[in-house]
Amino acid sequence: MINIKRAFLLLLWCLFATAEECVVRVLHTSDLHANLTGDDIAPTSFAQLSTVLGQLRADAPGPVLHIDTGDTIEGSLAGFLCKGRPILEALSAMGCDIWVPGNHEFDFGIQNFRELAANCPVAMLCGNLWPRGVPLKERYPAAKILYCGPARIAVIGLTASYLPNWYLDDFHAAFEVESAVMTLRRILPVILAQKPDAIILGIHQGLATRQSDPRGVNEVTRIAQLFPEIDLILGGHTHRAIPGRSVGHTWYLQPAAHGEFIGMAELTIDLERHRVRQITSRLVQPVLETPADPRTQAILAPHIAAAALEETSILHAPLGQEVSAKGRPGIACPISELICQALAERTEAVIALHGTLSAHGFPAGQPVTGADLFAVIPYENTAVTAEVTAAELEEILTEQWSLRQVYTYCGVWGTTAAIGADGHARITGIGPDLAAPAPGRRYRMVLNSHTAAGGGRTPVLRRILDQPEAHCRDTGISTRDILREWLVAHPEDFAVHPRQWLRIQRK
């Protein structure tokens, strides 16, 4: 049905706007993380978000463009169960024009992403990633010219250039990734030759200072410095709320995460000179009283219902004692101890390396449910095994200890070690009987796939796992499924008393 108010506004705009000027409203969503029903960060649902987007579209003084910059399909139990396709269909129902995939779009596997990309109901732009070995003409499109009223808007889409550091060999075998800067150097001259009235970059990277981004994950500042021709950058990934600020000659906007805000920018475009004369922007926060959009709700309802069933499924009888996520893994953290034990038993590993993935544990006095399990392990990691020597394990633990203030830090299980005043680890016992380590002997270690990939934080671990003699292998078994199996296999009440595997020596 035609929106009468919007049609009237567009008619007025056509009658009174000069031929030399046009105002285009750009709506920006990012890092929605499959928040279909609302959560602690953003209590409004996908369908409510859709209603707000529709209102902002209807109230616009002229043409509207909606761009989403990724991490859209992963982050909730419903997202895990549906693997993304219905969520992209809901994004299309919201009126989204362009979708730029983020790093978490690959969490459900390479083949799942390929199918999403091939059948995406929203135009997908992803210029700095392509299937390995395909000719140039078969790569994912990097840019698109969109006609917004009389204005010609060039939209560029780029994903996280750091992707190879977050995934293992199957990703490397399937895809090639280029830095966003290199991609822009290739494609921007072609775009400029088409004389667009404005250039917008949608990118799954954020604005960061060198101090807050020592690994160089985010290229936005450098992009703005090198390519002042870009008028507006719509960012994501870092979950920051930035209502709008200038970075050099470019305007930057980012709407935080989970649908907490919608970014809205208005570009006043000089059509005669093919340039943007002014950009204003702000963040719009949906309110709880917003009604749900029926079309979006109908698309998502079966998957929300399936998630509700899974969330309430009982995996274990009430525990007499809480299994808390508090305490340092490897020393005094019950939930990391339990995860390590479950992983080691499932993979027949002697050593396990794991930390906490959230602040959630298993509460006492109530059944352990599917919702509890997902809260403890909210990511789609798999179990990875490797064969390491005691000397290599000392290197790994020393590196982990240096990261103990970082959220990716992992504690150890199955081996005792002394941490010296200099931060170096020395193995004191290993295996079920904690015997002195045998020189040169290799012991099976298990860790999750995200830790094994390194994320650019653990070069020592990566060097050791990359050695042929380490026989590093991704089992493909979900760490969440492993913990689920452990809970089901141990129906009796249990308590977790963390062993102090790591002992700190002050002198």
Image (cartoon, grey):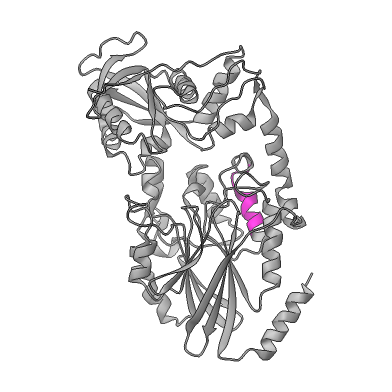
Q: Give the range drawn in magenta.
A: 82-91
For the residue pair 132 and 477, the one nearer the viewer reads as 477
Whether residue 365 is visible = yes
Q: Residue at x 46, y 33 (%)?
A: 382
For the residue pair 79 and 144, the one nearer the viewer reads as 79
Image x and y of residue 10, in percent: 70, 81
Q: Is residue 282 left or right of residue 4?
A: left
Image x and y of residue 108, in percent: 52, 42
Magenta stretch containing residue 76, yes or no? no
Q: Quadrant of residue 400?
A: top left
Asked if 11 appears above or below 209 in the picture, the reply is below
Q: Residue at x 39, y 61 (%)?
A: 135
Asked if 225 appears above or below 217 in the picture, the reply is below
Q: In which quarter of the image is residue 402?
A: top left
Asked if 137 appears above or below 272 in the picture, the reply is above
Which image quarter holds the C terminus? top left
Q: Residue furthest left?
A: 439
Whether residue 384 is visible = no
